[in-house]
Image (spheres, coloured by chain):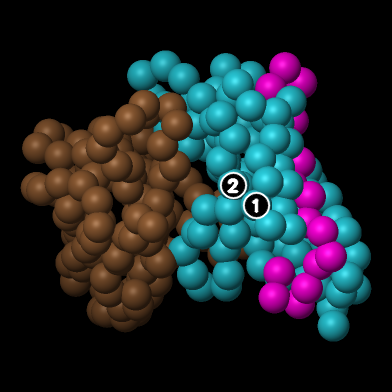
Amino acid sequence: KQEVTQIPAALSVPEGENLVLNCSFTDSAIYNLQWFRQDPGKGLTSLLLIQSSQREQTSGRLNASLDKSSGRSTLYIAASQPGDSATYLCAVKGTGSARQLTFGSGTQLTVLP
Amino acid sequence: GAVVSQHPSWVICKSGTSVKIECRSLDFQATTMFWYRQFPKQSLMLMATSNEGSKATYEQGVEKDKFLINHASLTLSTLTVTSAHPEDSSFYICSALGQGGSYSNQPQHFGDGTRLSIL
């Protein structure tokens, strides 16, 4: 059974810092990996999707990498802003008949002004 | 971009009431929709997967008679929590997967969630 772990569980940084969020998964047989943002009491906003054949994806100040063989992904946020404060979730889509998303427990990020 | 609308966003009701939550894909057709449950400060747990026109597939431990799912059209899925009790209070989120292309490269689009509070 796929398990997804995110470290750290919470992170607080001053505005302007670059930061890295980590995600690891136990089963490397995945279709893709997605990073989401969740604001308090809200649904999920998709940030980046990396296919299993890709190594990274970039969108603005965000860069996500994927090392499928080692079961790891990182989300790099450059020049952090208070508006980046949210919970960041990673999720992997498995292969086989289920093909469901398995989520990590998230990293709660606070960017201090 | 693909938009998923979930309604209502918040519902408070008495124990024993049945509550229906709607999930609509507004600008695309969703052959597959997913229902998740999220407890405070925890991640999303998949409850069931529904495909248009067929019965939903429930995850282990999820009572199908308690959580009724109907995916009657390509743009609408509903989750009905029957005879709700306080322990059913949670944040419920739906997600939709579009048609076309490869299943593997389609992102899932999420609704804004429904906060259910049972008194």
Q: What stretch is highlighted in magenta?
A: A68-84
* B82 with respect to A92 (left or right): left
| Picture quadrant of residue B105 | top left
Residue A107, visible in the rendered structure: no
**Residue neighbourhood size for the residue with mark 1, other residues' Cα within 10 Å, grouped as few (<14), some (14–19), many (≥20):** few
Q: Colour of chain A?
A: cyan
| Among numbered discs 1 and 2, the one appearing first in the sequence | 2
Question: Which residue, given by chain and number where applicable, does mark 1 sit on?
Answer: A59
Residue A25 drawn above or below residue A16: above
Q: Which of marks 1 and 2 is in front?
A: 1
Q: Assign the C terminus of chain B to one quadrant of the image.
A: bottom left
Q: In the rendered structure, which amino acid carries the disc numbered 1?
A: Ser
Which residue is rendered at x = 56% and y = 41% of the image? A49
Q: Residue A18, position in %: x, y?
A: 88, 59
Q: Residue B85, position in %: x, y?
A: 31, 66
Q: Which chain contains the residue that carries disc 1?
A: A
Is disc 1 in contact with disc 2, using a CB cutoff of under 8 Å? yes
Which residue is rendered at x = 40% and y = 51% of the image? B109
Which residue is rendered at x = 48% and y = 37% of the image? A101
Q: Same chain for the residues at labels 1 and 2, yes or no?
A: yes
- Magenta run includes residue A75: yes
